Amino acid sequence: MSEFWSDVVKGLTPYVPGEQPRLANLVKLNTNENPYGPSPRVLKAIRGAVDEDLRLYPDPNAEALKEAIADHHDVTTINVFVGNGSDEILAHVFLGLLKHSQPVLFPDITYSFYPVYCGLYEIAFNTVPLADDFSIRIADYARPNGGNIGGIIFPNPNAPTGRAISLAEIEQLLQMHPHTVIVIDEAYVDFGGESAIPLTHRYPNLLVVHTFSKSRSLAGLRVGFAIGHADLIEALERVKNSFNSYPLDRLAIAGAIAALEDKAHFERTRKAVIHSREGLVSALDALGFEVLPSVANFVFVRHPQHDAEKSALALRQRGIVVRHFKLPRIEQFLRITIGTDDQCATLINALREIL
Ligand code: PMP
């Protein structure tokens, strides 16, 4: 720690992403990437963009991509914000949309970047415990401690649990807090959840955040978007333009548009992940794991007789990487990304040896 660091920087505990090992001979099931890769049309579009003019700045508004997203989700471009992955959008949300004077609410077990942004921007927050079955209980968001709220944010499906709540429950939350910004992070929604995007037409306080990293298999390209009322989007544009006038580079814009165009690839790969998840859940169940019901591209599991950290290490020694969180209440869980059927079989065979 340097004497030149500000107090804010001294107090930060940055998010540590899952291990990103070199892929050779590894079965990488720790950061919820998609095993199938993007549509070939994405690669072609990116190659085309390389051959165009990288000398020129990209469109500062990424208008063509916003149009493609707006078309896809039945909104207009003034309802669409784009950024370098949903992480960047979430950072803008914490800085510009959630009130800093009152605590922001999110679940106690959730995406670990949320408290990191609160630390960075010095935002007060309260965590709301998940129910005993690890689900989000809307009634608990009524008004904990009786005070005002700076905003509510959670992923649906939640991470790392994979559990989702219904649109009816989200609507109940929106009605409970008509004057509070509510952000639903739908990074994993395409694997079996219900998107809240249609609700943005009726609730001006709802922002829905999506990513191209998971169901579109473009984690390396860094593209995310948010949909909400034009006023919310304008706030995000103000924050963004105070950081950087070019949210996305030319390759990202071209690749993301092509990804939206290839609906067949999207459907095929998304369904393949869901199908493999069902197979993996049965196989883990047969090995004695308790598996939380997941509608995401990962499962969250614990074994009543085997220590999670030891199992993760034993898998790692066999070239299989899964995620173990050393956090209260979930230290006996493993989060396993849904790989191809072959990768899932390799995992199950390794677990048979280990357990
Ligand atoms: N939200 C959640 C719940 C996530 O798990 C992730 C991925 N780690 C993200 C957002 C960020 O995804 P990206 O920045 O790749 O869009």
Image (cartoon, helix red, strand yellow):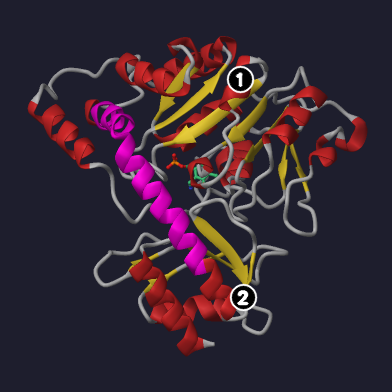
Report which residue position mark 1 lands on.
200
At a point 46% along the width and 23% down the height, the residue shown is 73
Residue type, label 2:
Phe
- Specify whether residue 21 is painted magenta: no
The reply to whether the residue tagged 1 has its Cβ within 8 angstroms of ligand 1 is no
Instruction: Examine the residues drawn in magenta and state their main secondary structure.
Output: helix
Residue 31, visible in the rendered structure: no
- Residue 263: within the magenta? yes
Quadrant for the C terminus in the image: bottom right
> SS class of the residue under badge 1?
helix
The residue where tag 2 is placed is 289
Could you say where residue 239 lies in the image, as x and y percent from the top left?
50, 18
Where residue 70 sits, quadrant-wise, is: top left
Magenta range: 252-280
Badge 2 crowding class, 10 Å Cα cut-off, few under 14, some 14 to 19, many 20 or more, is some
Q: Nearer the viewer, residue 68 or 330?
A: 68
- Report the amino acid beneath label 1: Thr
Q: CA distance from mark 1 to mark 2?
A: 38 Å
Residue positioned 73% across, 28% down in the render: 171
